[in-house]
Each structure stands twice: as C-alpha cells, then as structure tokens.
Image: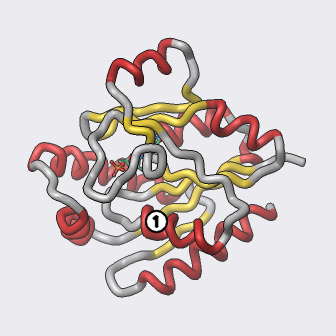
Amino acid sequence: MKGKLILVIGPSGSGKSVLLAYLRTALPDIVFPVSYTTRLPRPGERDGVTYHFISEEEFQTHVAQGEFLEWANYGGNHYGTLQSQILPQLARGKVIVREMEVQGAHQVQKELPPEQLAIIFINAGSWEESQRRIRTRAPISDGELMARRRHYEDEMGFMQKASRVIENPDGRIEKAKEEFLKAVRELSLQ
Ligand code: 5GP
C-alpha cells in the first residue's frame, strides 16, 4: 500500500496553523512531521512540537549531508523537512500532512510520484487581511513583514496547482475547519 503526503500551502497569516491544530485533534492517525527551522520561537511555541528550532550551522550540516527532502529560505530563515521524516512513513502507507511554503513544495513535486502527493491551498483573501492576522499573532519586525509580503504573490500563484482550495476569510473558520477535514479525508482515500 502506498501512502500519501498532503501539503498545506497558503500565504503567511492564512490560517494554516489553526486548521492543522484542528486536524490533529480530529484525525489522530495522520502523521504530522515536525520540520526544522532556524527562526526563533514565537511566544508559546515549543521546541520539538511546533518546529525543531536549530542553529544555522546545524541546518547547513543537514543540507551538506543531503538529509532534507526539501528545504527553503523564507523571510531570511531556513525551513526544511528531512527525508527520514517522510519516506519511511510513505512506504508504510501512512497519510502525512505538512504545511510548507512554495519553494519546498516545488522540490517535493520533483521527488514524489504525483499519486503520492496532494496539495491543499488555504486562501484567506487579500494581503491586508493576512497582514492584520500576522501582526495579531506575534510581534514582527517591518523587515520580516515585508519579506512575507514579497512571498504573498508567489503563494497565491500556487493556488491553481492545488488539489483543493479552502476559503478562510475572517469569520469563516468553523466552515473552513469542516471543509479542510473533509478534503484531507477524501484525498487520503484517493
Ligand atoms: P512560519 O515562520 O510562519 O512558521 O513559517 C513560514 C513559512 O514556512 C510558512 O509558509 C510555512 O508553511 C513554511 N514552512 C513551515 N515548515 C516548512 C518546511 O518544513 N519546509 C518548507 N519549505 N516550508 C515550511
């Protein structure tokens, strides 16, 4: 039996983390790999739970050893998923769900056969809405906010490549959770 990797893509502030937290409680059989990043933890984020928070040097060691299935630079920080977190689980027939930015998603598309990959896009509307959510979540420098703005267009361009699009504008989160859950269930079976 072949497993499936479902990537959750969407601009910063689109609500990916909230939807994933909901999925974790609703579908406990799914594998949620914890990625590696060089960015600093936000208030409330825990090492080994939200991410493995590592130094730039540690990150580059993983890169040099060819251990990442994919990795990317986003807003001046590095993010990556190890092959060892994904490939053995796929071989076991597991469904894996991971949020990711678009450069990483392009790399995964090259590595995995199309039948083992699905993409769910989270669309929260305009940059103005996303920006407001980002600012509410945690303090952020103007530089980092501008970097997230630059990625916004690229990410929105990815929407047309998605297997499913979940609309998540303000005030629709309960409906979005339901649709997200349904999409993951259906894509797991395909
Ligand atoms: P944040 O700093 O807001 O947690 O994440 C920034 C961006 O990196 C988001 O678009 C998020 O989905 C993406 N991201 C999170 N984990 C990974 C990963 O393992 N690989 C890649 N390529 N992107 C990731």
Q: Residue furthest right?
A: 1
Q: Residue furthest top?
A: 64
Taking depth in this image into account, of 157 and 21 the one nearest to the observer is 21
Q: Where is residue 88 drawn, in percent x and y?
A: 75, 36
Q: Where is residue 73 drawn, in percent x and y?
A: 35, 33
Taking depth in this image into account, of 87 and 11 the one nearest to the observer is 87
What is the total number of numbered labels drawn onto the structure image? Answer: 1
Task: Please tell me in which quadrant of the rendered image residue 184 appears.
Answer: bottom right
Q: Report the quarter where the C terminus lies.
A: bottom right
Q: Where is residue 20 drawn, in percent x and y?
A: 51, 64
Q: Measuring 36% from the left and 65% from the top, which residue is drawn there?
A: 14
Q: Where is residue 107 drawn, in percent x and y?
A: 55, 33
Q: Residue furthest left?
A: 142
Q: Which residue does the numbered mark 1 point to in the structure image? A: 122
Q: Measuring 76% from the left and 43% from the top, which residue is drawn there?
A: 90
Q: Measuring 41% from the left and 33% from the top, which residue is drawn there?
A: 72
For the residue labelled by badge 1, is the local secondary structure a helix, a strand or a loop?
strand
On screen, 172 above or below 91? below
Binning the other alpha carbons within 10 Å of mark 1 as few (below 14), some (14 to 19) or many (20 upward) gives: many
Looking at the picture, which amino acid does disc 1 mark?
Ile
Give the left or right position of residue 34, taking residue 136 as reference.
right
Give the left or right position of residue 115, taking residue 36 as reference.
right
